[in-house]
């Protein structure tokens, strides 16, 4: 029994020591990589904002966190290097077919869509993953230049109050398409409820945002 007792004690000591060393290494690696990862993510966000706001690299942003319908949005109010309001870019997300679908959408001061980029997704390659390009300018589901307050941004097979959606869904990926349009509609709502620094009064209003609630509910 003494030998068995010693074996258990030794195993316990070894396992405990291994856990402590492993935990220390993980903490060290996390500490070393935390800042570089944060910088990479920050640069990715900056590049994304430039992209969805028309490609002008000489912009300034002011982040604003908006709570709307139980969801949290990050709204980047954007001005040029002279302080002129360009609109804003909004981070929004929802569940797609394969997991979280995270989108950054750019709006001009009147709420028209300037561009978008997919920040993250788990959609099926060759199907839902086509959302990266499908809704871009010239794509089959082109939403660029449209305004959620004026256009019925639902997939064309959906209908509400006698009005059909205006956007062609990704072939064989209607769920992803609905999820994508849901994020865009909700991003517009958050955009309209933000308070961007502006040199004019042409930013989207809360009243305008309320007019897209039907679209958002349909997309859900």
Image (tube, rainbow, N blue to C red):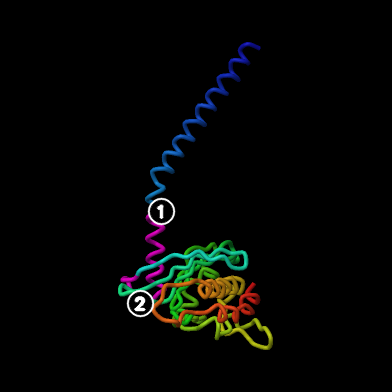
First to last magenta residue range:
37-59
How far apart are labels 1 and 2 at the CA level?
Answer: 29 Å
115 relative position to 55: left or right: right
Question: For mark 2, what is the residue?
Answer: 84
Image quadrant occupied by the N terminus: top right
Q: Nearer the viewer, residue 156 or 114?
A: 114
Q: Alpha-carbon neighbours of circle 1 within 10 Å: few (<14), some, or many (≥20)?
A: few
Q: Nearer the viewer, residue 69 or 216?
A: 69
* Rendered image quadrant of residue 149: bottom right
Give the main secondary structure of the magenta stretch: helix
Q: Is residue 57 magenta?
A: yes
Image location of residue 129, percent across then percent down: 51, 68
Report the disc number at residue 38.
1
Image location of residue 151, percent across then percent down: 55, 85
- Please count the marks in the image: 2
Q: Residue furthest top?
A: 2
């Amino acid at each position: 029994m003494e030998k068995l007792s010693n074996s258990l004690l030794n195993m316990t000591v070894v396992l405990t020591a291994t856990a402590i060393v492993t935990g220390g290494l993980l903490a060290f690696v996390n500490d070393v990589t935390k800042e570089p990862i944060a910088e990479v993510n920050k640069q990715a966000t900056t590049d994304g904002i430039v992209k969805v706001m028309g490609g002008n690299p000489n912009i300034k942003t002011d982040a604003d966190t908006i709570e709307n319908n139980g969801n949290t949005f990050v709204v980047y109010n954007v001005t040029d290097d002279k302080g002129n309001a360009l609109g804003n870019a909004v981070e929004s997300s929802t569940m797609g077919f394969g997991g979280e679908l995270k989108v950054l959408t750019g709006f001009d001061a009147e709420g028209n869509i300037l561009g978008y980029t997919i920040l993250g997704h788990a959609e099926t390659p060759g199907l839902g993953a086509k959302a990266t390009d499908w809704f871009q300018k010239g794509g089959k589901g082109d939403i660029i230049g449209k305004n959620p307050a004026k256009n019925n941004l639902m997939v064309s097979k959906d209908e509400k109050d006698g009005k059909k959606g205006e956007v062609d869904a990704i072939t064989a990926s209607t769920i992803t398409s609905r999820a994508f349009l849901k994020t865009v509609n909700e991003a517009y709502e958050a955009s309209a409820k933000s308070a961007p620094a502006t040199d004019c009064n042409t930013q989207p209003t809360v009243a305008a945002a309320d007019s897209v609630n039907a679209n958002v509910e349909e997309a859900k």
